[in-house]
Structures are given as C-alpha cells and as structure tokens.
Amino acid sequence: MTDAGELRSRTRRLLAEHPPATTGRTDFLKARFDAGLAWVHYPAGLGGLDAPRALQAVVDAELAAAGAPDNDPRRIGIGLGMAAPTLLQYGSEEVKERFLRPLWVGEEVWCQLFSEPGAGSDLAALGTRAVRDGGDWVVDGQKVWTSSAHLARWAILIARTDPDAPKHRGITYFVCDMTDPGVEVRPLRQITGEAEFNEVFLTGVRIPDAHRLGEVGDGWRVAQTTLMNERVSIGGARIPREGGMIGKLATTWRERPELRTHELHRRLLDLWVDAEVARLTGERLRQQLVAGQPGPEGSAMKLGFARLNQAISGLEVELLGDEGLLYGEWEMSRPELVDFTGRDAGYRYLRSKGNSIEGGTSEVLLNIVAERVLGLPPEPRNDKDVAWKDLSR
Amino acid sequence: MTAQGDLLYSETEDDLRAAVRALLADRAGHQTLLDRIETADPYVPGLWKSLAGDIGAAGLLVPEELGGQGASHREAAVVLEELGRAVTPLPYLTSAVVATETLLGLAGRGGPATELLAGIASGHTVAVLAVPLSTAPDAEPFPSGTPDGEPSPPAVTGAGPLPAATVTGVADAVAADVLLVPRADGLYAVPAGEATVEPQTPLDLTRPLARVTPEPGSGTRLAEGEAARAAVRRGLLAGAGLLASEQLGLAAWCLEETVRYTRERHQFNRPVGSFQALKHRMAQLWLDLVGARAAARAAADALATGAPDAPLTVAVAQAYCSKVAVRAAEECVQLHGGIGMTWEHPAHLALKRAKSDQIALGSTGRHQDAIAALTNLPAPE
C-alpha cells in the first residue's frame, strides 16, 4: 500500500522533473496525472496509485507549498465530481483511457444531460429517447438546467431505451458528444437575469454503442453513482464563524446603524444563531467523517443551507430599505461560476431561491430523510410497476 | 480559523450514557413518574443515591483531589441528555452543575466551599443556588443594600410584595440540604434547616419549585464582592450550557416516540406516518435535532476546555436548543393526536419540561441579547 512518505517523495520527484516555474500549466497537470498524483485513490495508469483517498491531502499540501498550478476544480466540477466516478465504475478500459486524463486536466469540460422539462423531481420519468441503429444509438429529446453545456466537449446522458418497461428499468446511460451536429445549446435565463444554465435540444444525435456506460436498461442504477456524488459535492466546505452570507448581513448591520430597527434586530439574531449552528453542524459532520463515523447528517446540511441562504438574503434586502428597491444589473450574462458574495443582496436573494431546488428539491430531500433516516413508511405509489409509456403526463 | 472543539462522543461518554439510561429505564419509567409527580415528593426514592453515588455522576465536574470524579462538562452533559430524555425529577442540574460549578469558583483556597464540594460530589449533600430558576448567567442575583441593613428583595417572580430575602421559583430547593444564598454582602451557605422552604405549584411537575426564605443571619459566608459574583456567574453559565444537553435529550425522545407512534398508528387504511404532511414535520425536527446536537456538544466542550468564547457558545446553544425542545414536544403532542392530550401518555411531561426549560437560566431573548453584545450586533439606538 502506498503511504504518505512515498507520496511525498513521488510529489517531490514530479516537482523536480517538471518545475512549475518553467513548465506550462497543462503540461504540468498532464505530468501530474501520469505520475499518479491527480487523484491518488484512482487506479494506477488512470491518474492514481490505488492509495487511500485521505492521502490526497499530502500531495496537495506539497504541491501548494511549491506553488504548482491546480486544475481549477470549480470550473470542471461536473466532470470531476459526477462524470469521473461514473466513468471509473462503469466505463470500459478504452473509455477510461480516452476520457479521464483530459477530464482531470481540464482540457475537456463535461456537462450533465439528466433533467428534462417533464422530468424534474421525478427524474426517472424522463422521455428523451435513444433508439438502436446498427452500432449506434440515435437520440431525440430535450434536456434542461444544464450547467456548462455551452462550454462542454462531452456530456453524461440518460435516455429512454425501452418505453414498454416500468420507468426505472427502461433507461440507459451514455457519453454524448456535445459537438454532434444534432446538439443545440440555448441559454436558459433565470430570475436573476443571467443564464448560468442551458436548455439542450437533441435531434438525431448519434452515439456509438462503445460510449454506453453499464448495461442497456440499467441506466437508473448507473445514474445513482452520479447523483450520490452530486449530493456529496453540494454539502459545503469548512467555513469560519460568520462565513458565508451571514457575514455580509452582519457587516451591513454594523456599518449602517441608520438602517436598524428592533424587529430586524430580533430576526438578525435568530438567523445569526441558526447560521452559527449550521456551521457547528458542518464541523461535527467533518469530525464524524474523519473519525470514520459517517452519519446521515450530510443530507441535513443542504436543506439547512438552502433555508438559511434564502432567509438571510431576504432579510438583507429588507434591511437595505431604499437600496433594497434597486438591482445591480439585469442584462443577461453567462457566468462560469456562481458568485454569491461578489454581487448585491438582491442577486443573492433571487439566486438562493435555486438552493432549495437544484440537486434535489427540499421537499424530496425531506422525504428521503423521513424514509431513509427515520424509517417512516413511503407514500403509496402507482407509478412503479406501470410501463413508462402508460404513465400520465 | 480557530480550532473547533471536539463535537463527538467519546467511548467513555457512550458507556456513561448506557449506564444512566439503564438505571432510569429500570427505576424511573414514565409510569413511575406519573404515579409520583402529584405527591409531595416527586423524586423516586433511592434514585439519587444510585446516580450520584453508585454511578458517580454527581462528582463529574469536581476534581479528584476535591473528592470528585475529575471528569468534565462533556460527561455531565451526557448525563443531562439522559435525564432530559426520561424527564427525570432529580437535583442534577441544580446541585451537580450550578451549585457545584459556583463552589468550584471559590474552592481555590480550601475552607467551607471545599468541604461542601466533597459532600456534593459523593451525593450525600444536595446544594442549590437560591435564585429563581429563570436567572440568566449575566443577571445580577445579588440584592443591593448595605451589608447590615434590610436588603431589598432580589429579582422575584409572581405577584405581590414579598418579605425581604424571600426568593421564589427556586428549583429543587425542597430536596436541598444546603442553600447557596446571594446576599448583599456575599454568598452564604445556609443549612436547609435554617430556611423556610414552601413548595409552589410548578408547570413542570418533574422540577419542583419553592419559595425560599433563609432566616436572617443564618449560614456561613463563602465569599464576598466580585469573587462571589464571579462564582455565581460561572455556576449559571455552566448550568445554561448544560441545560442545552437536557433539551437535546428531551427533543430526541420526543422525535423517536413520535416516529414510533406514527409508524404504528393506522388511519385511512395507512400508517399515519406515511402521509407526507406528517413526514416532513418529523424530518424537519430531525434536522433541528442535528443542529441542536452540534450546538449542545459545542457548549459542553467549550465549558470543559475553558474556551474563551464559552459565553457565546453557551448563549448560542441556549437560544437554539430551547426552541428545538419546545417545538419537538409540541409536535410530539400534536402528531400523537388525541392520546397526546391525555394525562396517561407521557408527552405532557416532555412538553411541560420543555416549556419550563425555555425560561430556565435565561430566556431566548436574554441569550440573544448576550449574543448581540458579544458579537457587536447592537440593537437600534
């Protein structure tokens, strides 16, 4: 088993052979990948060394100390967090060889073609069709809420291959080429005025069968790998006291005494307490993970942050009074990253409305907590054993 | 970024929890409590000796050289979680936490405080700080006035003028051997025999309240001036911080019991717990509990380590956990339907304890005011 000492010496060798000061960014990242130091828990030859995941921190610390460039993980989050684990688990050797290196290096951006206008919370009801045609599949349909589609080279895609099967059983998982002439990407303008996301129209898109992940009809199970990784990545990073939105609100309160009222003061303190408790909850979750006692508390984090962000930004707009009546900029822009703190309170108020929808609505997450954590019985359902084509829509 | 204290439970703490839970399940089940709470003596006979002496829980905060277990607030918090869960009438928070911590603030130089601590730690002595249960850590429970003159009444609750030096709403005074009495000229230890203790009718029958009138001139002075005040503040701060763990345990019981009941209870040919309207309410309570656990652990750990931000962490835990415990108990009553409204079902014990705990050791608003001062988030001019 690879240990911390060996990883440290491997990292130093990489730095010696490819000094960051004189090596191009992409060349350095490729060399890092080839040295097995990209994600050490991945297999040898695919950017890793089959080492324990926790040892990645050893490599990262060495590289950061040497001023080495990173792969800008926020820009390629969907590739790193969702596509890569799925490719690793279900891809053929050729698929893994072909895709993982340019994905990790950031030469090829990925997006996720899952949600549809008619399949949001009920994702398994999706209607985009994939029909076999010789060695290819031909895909027709419409996807929505696709981040990075306008930048992406590849997509992970789920489509219906058997309309006669119940909805969970007739889905297949593919890698889709975003440069196919049948792919049309249109910006999806949000209530903030900007367009972080896209609608993607698929018309006669051809996908070789070699780009299928998992068995035909087994796409729902494959997609669980992707979605589990999404929930992990939305949990939120470690933050200091008054980190996040509450810090903005507290600063405004301190600097603008003329805005204060008693009623707002009580609500500010309520939210300050809630934000501090959310921070402590995150700390406790991290301590559990470090101690090897992962609990179900992770699902609490996303629910809590959605509610808090909305309440805090709402209070801030109200506190600002006359200024709260104004909005920075309505012109449609296409941001690469969501920046909650760089813009005004009105933007935060509107953007955080998405926090309780994206990555699973709060209502669906509450069902998951109730059924999987508390063990409460499911609602009776009438959609599980019916052919997809016979479902109401 | 400052280091964050340990928010988990150690193996020792888990073992302690198991011992306390087994004891309470065996000796102080809900039916036992329902049979006793309307009598003059709600405390289950012999239970204090078992918890305080046999398990050693009364001396957790007291160093070994002073006759205690040399543990910390973290372990005492786990005991309180279990006492909250079972809504047990015992003078633990009052004697083993508030009075103990007050005396620890004075025990540096030996003397009567040190002797008292040894008795409390062994479980032989129950001591109670003679202030209203509602007293917040930053309150000023010492009456003003000249040392020899007639002291004016301290903060009082209830209607009508009271004789001087009478304090109302003193929790567990009826069980006390010694009362720690704040007077204008210092903090006194007064034997219970030298005070009049008149039981009041409390909302929460599992935490007896009494009107306490120490005889003039009674008792031994333990400290005076700022030393006495600081010790009492320290006692109340520890009490408020660990009350959060009692509230956590109570809320956890309420949720578990509600989940259990709604899985079994059938209406409309389904378990009522399968209705989304109810599931979401229970899931939301679970989220609140996850937060309450983090907040209560943070407060216990901050007190145990003497963290400089302990007053803030305690205020946060109180402001949060009070609310969660009340909501959990209210939801427990509501989601049980009719049975939750009956005397025979224990939900009302939890509701009454939770509602009283909301007022105990400082209201939510009082703790929020403390937070505002500590974090520089001032009220309007």
Image: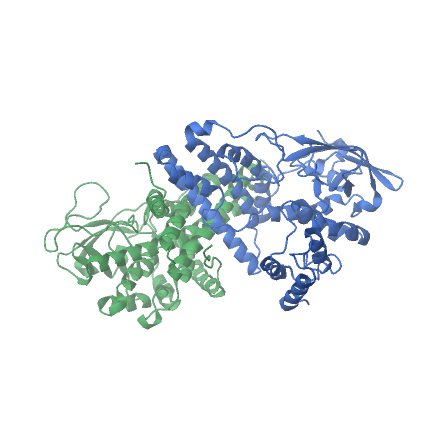
Chain colours: A blue, B green
Examine the image and state in which quarter residue A186 appears. top right
How many numbered circles are shown?
Answer: 0
Residue B131 in sight: yes
Residue A117 in sight: no
Query: Which one is in front, B350 or B341?
Result: B350
Query: Which one is in front, B222 or B197?
Result: B222
Q: In the picture provided, is A85 more to the left or to the right than B65? A: right
Q: In the picture provided, is B175 more to the left or to the right than A333? A: left
Residue at image position (63%, 56%) is: A68
Q: In the picture provided, is A319 more to the left or to the right than A58? A: left
- Determine whether B306 is above or below B286 in the image: below
Point out the residue furthest to the right here. Answer: A134
Residue A239: x and y in percent read: 50, 50
Quick one: quadrant of the C terminus of chain B?
top left
Residue A122: x and y in percent read: 67, 36
Point out the residue furthest to the front here. Answer: A22
Residue A383: x and y in percent read: 70, 36
Point out the residue furthest to the bottom here. Answer: B65
Query: Which one is in front, B289 or B355?
Result: B289
Q: In the picture provided, is A20 more to the left or to the right than B123? A: right
Residue B227: x and y in percent read: 23, 60
